[in-house]
Image: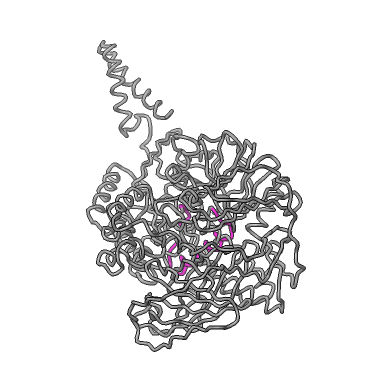
Amino acid sequence: MQVLLSRILRRAARVDHALAWCGRKLAGTLLTVFVALLLAATPAQRADAAEPHRYALSMFHFNIQYVAGGLEGFVPGLPADSPQVRNWEIDDEMVEDHIITESFEPVLDLYLAHPTWGVDIELQGYFLDVLAARHPTVLAKLRSLAVSGQAEVVSFHYSDQLFLAFPREDWERSQTLTRQTFERNGIPLATTVFAQEGQAGTGMPRAMAERGYRVLVWPKNLFSFQHGAFDAAPYYSLGGVDMIAGAQGVRSVAGDVEIDVDWTFFDDGEKLATGDADPYFTPIFIHKPPAVARYEKEVAGLEAQGYSISTIGRYVSEVRGLGVEPAQAPPLLDGTWQPNSTDGMRKWLGGAGIWDAERDNDVRSVQALAHREIVAAETAAHASAIDRSPLDDAWRLLALSEVSDSTGINPFRGEVEYGIGDATEALRIATEAIDQAKASLGAQTVQIDVAQGSVQVEPPVPEGGGEIAPPLQVRVDAGGRTWRQSWTGAAAGVARLELQFDPGSAAPSRKLAVTFPGDSTEIVYCPALDDDRPVSIPKSSFTFDHYQMALANGLIGLSAQRFVVKETARVHLAATVTPTDGDVTFSDDTAPTQDRLTWVFHVVDGTLDDAVGYANRLNVSPTVIR
Amino acid sequence: MKRPSFQVRLGLVCLLFVAAGCGGGNGAATPTSSPTFTSTATATLTPTATFTYTPTNTPIPTTTATPTPTRTSIPTATVTSTPTPTATRLPGVEMAGRLDLDIRWSADVEIRVVGKNLTAMLTLNDAREVAVAGVALEGMGNVHDFPEVDAVLYTARFTSPPVADGRCGAQPVSLSLTLLRRGTNDHVAGGVAVYCGANTNSGTAARMLRLAGSLTAK
């Protein structure tokens, strides 16, 4: 805004001088203001400035798991053999094929027709596997665009998974799969990062740098949700990598360098060529050439105005080359690209959508259980020297199961069960590996310590902690269900809370919540992909009235020396924090009414390091007896 | 990714289907009676591994269900498979249920648990491009306990002859059944991972079928 005001005043001064010569001071002053405003509203350059550098950027976010598992069962009120259902409820492969032929290939064709236009296309690694298996000619088109540098093919994960809610190891395995599939298919992997649901977090830069990524696209709405309206800098520095505010235009003057940025597209890529239809609606999810033509005309118009239709990576590189220094990013929290409408991360971790089949906690906690079992199986396989290769399949299945759409934004029942079914198969592979390891070791029972990488044969049977007095008073909203709490000592300074909810009988029993009292004026947690690196950020840094946290390792601070850790294999819901008090609430609006449910939390009294270590031994690198 | 615009549109479309029941009927299966705890697992995991462990814990609901299969689908393959009669008066605990298969179809599952082992029968009422509809497949498997989280996983493996025009073409089909139960709830969920080739239970699945519903003691 300061830049804009400065420009207006400079222009006003020049015009004012000319009008004074005519002696019509008053009218001239009014006219000055009018003309100045007109001038300010146009992209005209300053007389004493160099030609502005204009860029038009894009991010086409494609998701081959847009309807994970396919559309069968989507319109259950119609009989399976009706023509309407046959036309609509297509299976998993047909949904994938439609995404490619109706929405993806037309975008590639558009850019192939304009070799001077750069574009960013984001997709998961699995997308390439589908192209290679059934659409080799489309894969060849993508390869052509990528190899020439015209397109940046952006990918951060193999599956469109909710990686902000799970341990780093899950993402590492997914990332490795992504690189393998890019290499196998001859597609250069871009150094720009954008992710499913616009997930962005402060643990990403370190992970990015270690993997050769350079530019993080941070969604503008996730930025403004935390800090209010803002004028974007040309680019930022965040944790050692460059960052830009996705889809936020830039009007910046730094010295003699003027940078203008407009965005031509920043959305689900499936929508461009289909006239804003999406893959849930088979009958209308078809390639509509006029929609592509409209977009083509818009971009051509920008090019005619002098805009460089650029990739994001090239834009940042050129701006840096002009001597523009990055702005320092403000304090930021993990989140997604539409935090207003999704209530931050909660839509995927307890928030309800429009269907009644959601069971967020069920889905996410079984995935957390699968993580624990796979890392235990890896440890057991290493200790027993058995073949661990089946575990690669388990990691792949876990990545698929963790797809964001199994719990949000509006998952229908098929997507919910996709998230469970892939996870239980991963669980099966892991348990069989552990059984095989036990047989190899000649053991009936083993204690597997993932953090230590050790396996103890026939361990002594450990005793459970005794009942203790509650260290704090939780507030529980049981939705009309009968509920109980029990507190036991879990370790020195650690109290384990088990909340049991009996089956309910009415809709309100879908909604459960527990609040832990706290007094912290800071948000203390470990950002995703940084399981062992906690951050403490003053709540006063932010403008929101509440925020939803995923908590990949389960930890969040209640006070300076007290922390609560959710046991993610039992309860994996978003934590709600507010700037006005230190309380932390976990809530679920999707609890299955007929089920008996148990949530488990651990309250740790000690140092932050103690709490982080405890959380990671519980949820990231556990000890299990099998 | 479902953006808000999708929500609005979906809501409108859903209204068009209200008469047909769109958005309804997707809830979890309803147990036929209240479950009773038979588990003694206290599931007290700590990082120092001091938890109460009950290795043989196998929560079994006490409700009774009598599946009455109605096999209406027509087999799509020209294979010969002999349905296996249900074993009776055998040791162990029997569980059975008609589970929803990919929402629109069903699968009859019968499991007999003896210790940590189980035998299972799986009958799909639709071929799903992987097996012959209406023909019971017999398999063996295991019960896997996760006492620290009060959960149990039932697994079983099956083999089906090649299915014409199926996802595995001329290859035989290996099926991996997994069902997870939390505590003593009747509700189980999981699926059938379908692998091409005989005795193949890893690699990239040719199809993942989804199962959910009530699996109760017979």
Residue A216 visible in this rendered orientation of the protein: no
The percent coordinates of residue B143 (x first, y second) are: 59, 73
The percent coordinates of residue B133 (x first, y second) are: 38, 79
The percent coordinates of residue B173 (x first, y second) are: 44, 81
Please tell me which residue lies in front, A460 or A46. Answer: A460
- Residue at the extreme left: A290
Residue at 39% in and 66% down: B103
Residue A19 visible in this rendered orientation of the protein: yes
Q: Main secondary structure of the magenta part?
A: helix
Please determine whether, in this image, residue B104 is positioned above or below residue A322: below
Magenta-colored span: A165-194
User: Does the segment drawn in magenta span residue A618?
Assistant: no
Please tell me which residue lies in front, A81 or A423. Answer: A81
The percent coordinates of residue B141 (x first, y second) are: 56, 78
User: Does the segment drawn in magenta span residue A188?
Assistant: yes
Residue at 25% in and 52% down: A291
**Rendered image coloring scheme:** one colour
Please tell me which residue lies in front, B172 or B54. Answer: B54
A112 on left or right of A224: left
Please determine whether, in this image, residue A606 is positioned above or below residue A285: above
Residue A452 position by quadrant? bottom right
Q: Quadrant of the C terminus of chain A?
A: bottom right
Please determine whether, in this image, residue B163 is positioned above or below residue A396: below
